[in-house]
Amino acid sequence: MKFRKLGSSGIEVSEISLGSWLTYSGGVERQQAEACVRTAFEEGINFIDTANVYGRGASEALLGEVLSGYDRSSYVLATKVYFQMSDTDRGLSAAQIHKQIDASLERLRTDYVDLYQCHRYDDDTPLQETMQALTEVVEQGKARHIGFSEWPVQRIEESLALGGVARWASSQPQYSMLWRRPEAEVIPLCERENISQIVWSPLGQGVLTGKYRPGEPPPVDSRAASDSMSGFMDRLIQDPVLEAVQRLRPVAEGAGLTMAQLALAWVLRQSNVASAIVGASRPEQVRANASASGVTLDAQTLAAVDEALGDVVVR
Ligand SMILES: NC(=O)c1ccc[n+]([C@@H]2O[C@H](COP(=O)([O-])OP(=O)(O)OC[C@H]3O[C@@H](n4cnc5c(N)ncnc54)[C@H](OP(=O)(O)O)[C@@H]3O)[C@@H](O)[C@H]2O)c1
């Protein structure tokens, strides 16, 4: 496993990290989830991403239980705040940030997270209030660093212009061969500001592994076939997308790679990407994904990827 610097934080994160969104919030059996986390450690993955809202605390609670068996300094832990936790709890007000960090730390069974991320931008709270509260959380030692996820570029710029507040270490956007929006503005801005990308759904929720065939029902053991986990895949499992993904097969084979390795190496070709956050429902997937670390793609392969995917790419 190779490691990259997380912005200006001084933290080094594994190029492949373990996410816990739909999987460890209840989508995957408890034992399977635990086996995935244990396999991640065996593979040298040191970076784990969660959020308070994943299963409304369930994902954090599971991770807290499993991670309590590991030395706290051996892993980098990231969680998030913003989404609805109860009828009255949501957003990035100072009161919410202070309340939610304490609740997350309790569930995660730790005194601090390495990275506390704003899951989205909160239009109902003044930016200064959010930034001040995040700064206090850092000063209290409850979070070592802060990050944002999917903030509008203008809001990122405004936050950077504020004085006397903590600096961002990371940005967490959706980014994959199929979804390239961050390339237009977010990545160039973050490169200038020494903020790293830690990217979500780098496998397009599994679609980029090629296991979904156009015109065929999804494999029974896949996310797209799961009642509890398939709800966010509509755009991805359209036949034109699946047909384009199948055209990647010869590209991967030509490069001597699996489809998963090709997809993960593709996001990691960007030096501003510190880590690809990958979900996994089985330990074999964790191993397969970890093997993408250190893989480099030549110009010919990158061009072949673009040609294969054509106009299904969102830019
Ligand atoms: N900040 C945000 O707003 C945000 C949003 C979404 C996600 N995230 C973070 O990013 C993480 C990753 O996102 P994601 O889970 O949506 O997408 P992903 O990593 O692109 O896809 C993960 C899914 O793909 C399948 N898979 C993984 N490795 C595979 C392999 N080697 N071969 C075949 N199938 C494989 C598994 O599903 P099946 O086996 O069930 O098919 C797995 O659950 C999340 O867990 C979360 O931590 C953040």
Image (cartoon, helix red, strand yellow):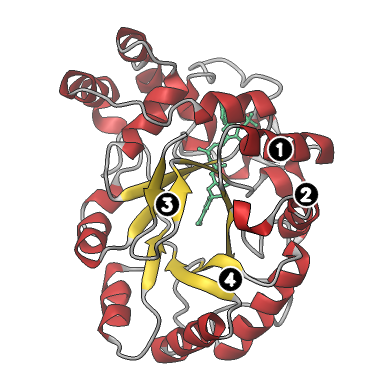
Dot 3 and dot 1 residues touching (CB under 8 Å): no
Question: Could you say which disc has been placed on residue 29 in the image?
Answer: none
- Which three-letter amino acid code belongs to the residue tagged 1? Arg
Question: At which x and y percent is residue 154?
Answer: 26, 74
Q: On the image, numbered disc 2 is attached to which residue?
A: 66
User: What residue is at 22 percent from the left and 63 percent from the top?
Assistant: 189
Q: Nearer the viewer, residue 74 or 298?
A: 74
Q: On the image, numbered disc 3 is attached to which residue?
A: 198
Query: Distance between the Cα atoms at labels 3 and 1?
Result: 21 Å
Question: At which x and y percent is residue 81?
Answer: 58, 71
User: What residue is at 69 percent from the left and 29 percent from the top?
Assistant: 282
Kindly tell me whether residue 177 is visible in this rendering: no
Dot 3 and dot 2 residues touching (CB under 8 Å): no
Q: Is mark 3 on a helix, strand or loop?
A: strand
- Which three-letter amino acid code belongs to the residue tagged 3? Ile
Question: At which x and y percent is residue 236?
Answer: 47, 35
Q: On the image, numbered disc 4 is attached to which residue?
A: 81
- Which three-letter amino acid code belongs to the residue tagged 2? Val
User: What residue is at 67 percent from the left and 58 percent from the top?
Assistant: 72
Dot 1 and dot 2 residues touching (CB under 8 Å): yes
**Nearer-N-terminus badge (4/1):** 1
Q: In which quarter of the image is ligand 1?
A: top right
- Which three-letter amino acid code belongs to the residue tagged 4? Val
Query: Distance between the Cα atoms at labels 4 and 2?
Result: 21 Å
Q: In which quarter of the image is the C terminus?
A: top left
Q: Is mark 1 on a helix, strand or loop?
A: helix
